[in-house]
Image: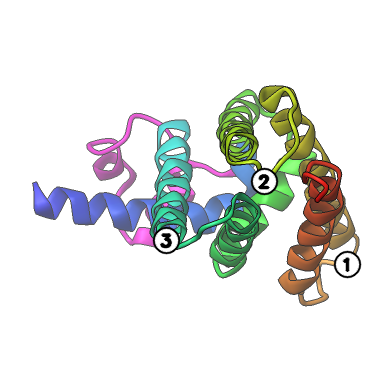
Amino acid sequence: MEKEGSKKEQILDAAMQCFSRFGLQKSTMDDIAHVLGMKKASLYYYYKNKEAIFIDAIERDVLAAKAQMEKKLINTKTCTDKMHMYIDTMVDHFGNRKEFFELNLSTVVENNAIIQKIRSQINCSSIEFFSETIKEGIKSGEFAQGEHKSLGKLLHSFLEARRIEFLYNSLQDRNKEVDFQILKDDLLMTLDLALNGLKTRK
């Protein structure tokens, strides 16, 4: 089982290279097998199609980012700091993985049902985090009273709009090195502007 798990990890790494380079629609099982140096028939022993590989690859990276964030949140006291930590961790994690960033660029131009479904799941997870953190902040008195679910959804929408704009701008010049600090600073500034309206006045 350990050997099979290791092989799956190799497949996911190879697949991410293909997906980030060609996009999900144009990538094939042949491409992935070629990167691995194995026969396509052997690849089907582990996965029935490229979509199944894609789903596992994304889930693996998202879970890794969440685990990293949860460790950092243990010693984070205020809800404002927790949301700062969320953005900081997510940008650093995916910014350090060129394949994942390139894949994010491809999702901007690909209208694929699987990509949209995964994007929707990630959005729901983000909305839940912001909503529950705002709820905690309201309870502790850090934030003023409000409907935490609506506020969490609105905050996520602001940040997602900034993320998408960053991706579109990156698409304009693919030869230019991407500065993820710009994205992080922009998201943190947007977050602070939104939270200033939520904080209780003393």
Which residue matches tag 2? 142
User: What type is the residue that disc 1 sits on?
Assistant: Asp
Is label 1 or label 2 in front?
2
Disc 3 and disc 1 in contact, CB within 8 angstroms: no
In the picture of the structure, the residue carrying the numbered disc 1 is 173
Lateral position of residue 5 relative to residue 105, left or right: left
Q: Is residue 21 visible?
A: no
**Residue 141 painted magenta:** no
Residue located 67% across and 46% down the image = 142
Q: Can you name the residue that lies furthest to the front here?
A: 202
Badge 2 local density, few (<14 within 10 Å), some, or many (20+)? some
Q: Image check: 77 left or right of 57?
A: right
Depth check: give the residue in front, 190 or 163: 190
Three-letter residue code for mark 3 = Val
Task: Estimate the spatial distance between the alpha carbons at disc 3 and disc 1, rounded to whole Å.
Answer: 27 Å
Q: Are marks 1 and 2 in contact (CB under 8 Å)?
A: no
SS category of the residue bearing label 2:
loop
Mark 1: few/some/many CA within 10 Å (<14, 14-19, 20+): few
- Mark 3: give few (<14), some (14-19) or many (20+) Cα within 10 Å: some
Q: Which residue is mark 3?
A: 35
Instruction: Give the vertical position of 98 relative to 159 (above or below).
Output: below
Horizontal and vertical percent position of residue 74: 40, 57
Asked if residue 35 lies in the magenta stretch, the reply is yes
Q: Image point 80% across, 55% down: which residue?
A: 192
Q: Quadrant of residue 147?
A: top right
- Report the span colored magenta: 27-50
